[in-house]
């Protein structure tokens, strides 16, 4: 069977407290469209294994954009500082961009207790 083109992809933590918030945001953003999900404890904190999974999914489903979403109180990261989360995601985005330069990467924070997703920055969007 031939692959399809997903509307997007998201990498997020498996923490159950954020599942409904992330799914609600995906529904609003992509209106029931096909969105690939990579869900792991600590999300992008795992590094190479997640990066390889994204590369494989992109090869199959050719999504144009990917959202990296950390939640604000993730126990996998040593600090729960907003700037630390953002720095970690940007470093991961740089490595991803080296592998898949055509993918737009969004950096997002999932606010666990307030239950919303904040897009912090969009990287590698050549259309703007």
Image: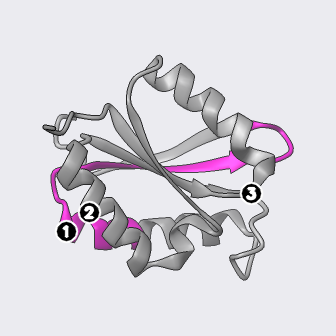
- Which percent across, then down, holds residue 42? 63, 69
Residue under the point 17% across and 43% down: 126
Q: Which residues are magenta?
A: 91-115
- Do the CB atoms of the residues marked 2 and 1 lie less than 8 Å apart? yes
Alpha carbon distance from label 1 to label 3: 27 Å
In the rendered structure, does residue 77 fall within the stretch colored magenta? no
- Which percent across, then down, holds residue 52? 32, 71
Mark 1 nearby-residue class (10 Å; few <14, some 14–19, many ≥20): some
Q: Earlier in the sequence, mark 1 or mark 3?
A: 3
Residue under the point 55% across and 20% down: 28
Q: Is residue 89 positioned above or below 106 on the image?
A: below
Q: Quadrant of residue 90?
A: bottom left
- In this view of the protein, which residue sits in the foreground, 53 or 96? 53
- Do the CB atoms of the residues marked 3 and 2 lie less than 8 Å apart? no
Q: Is residue 101 positioned above or below 79 on the image?
A: above
Q: Quadrant of residue 8?
A: top left
Alpha carbon distance from label 3 to label 2: 23 Å
Q: Earlier in the sequence, mark 2 or mark 1?
A: 2
- Pointer 1: what residue? 99
- Pointer 2: what residue? 55
Q: Which residue extends farthest front?
A: 1
- In this view of the protein, which residue sits in the foreground, 24 or 95? 24
Q: Circle 3 — which element?
A: loop
- Which percent across, then down, holds residue 68? 48, 54
Q: Earlier in the sequence, mark 3 or mark 2?
A: 3
Mark 3 nearby-residue class (10 Å; few <14, some 14–19, many ≥20): some
- Pointer 3: what residue? 15
Alpha carbon distance from label 2 to label 1: 7 Å
The label nearer to you, 1 versus 3, is: 3
């Amino acid at each position: 069977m031939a692959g399809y083109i997903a509307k997007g992809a998201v990498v997020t933590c498996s923490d159950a407290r954020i599942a409904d918030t992330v799914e609600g945001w995906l529904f609003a953003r992509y209106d029931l469209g096909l969105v690939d999900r990579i869900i792991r404890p600590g999300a992008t904190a795992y590094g190479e294994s997640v990066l390889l999974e994204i590369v494989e999914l992109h090869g199959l489903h050719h999504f144009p954009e990917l959202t990296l979403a950390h939640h604000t109180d993730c126990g996998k990261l040593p600090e729960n500082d907003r700037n630390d989360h953002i720095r970690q995601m940007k470093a991961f985005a740089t490595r991803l961009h080296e592998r898949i330069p055509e993918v737009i990467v969004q950096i997002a924070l999932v606010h666990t207790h307030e239950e919303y997703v904040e897009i912090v920055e969009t990287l590698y969007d050549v259309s703007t």
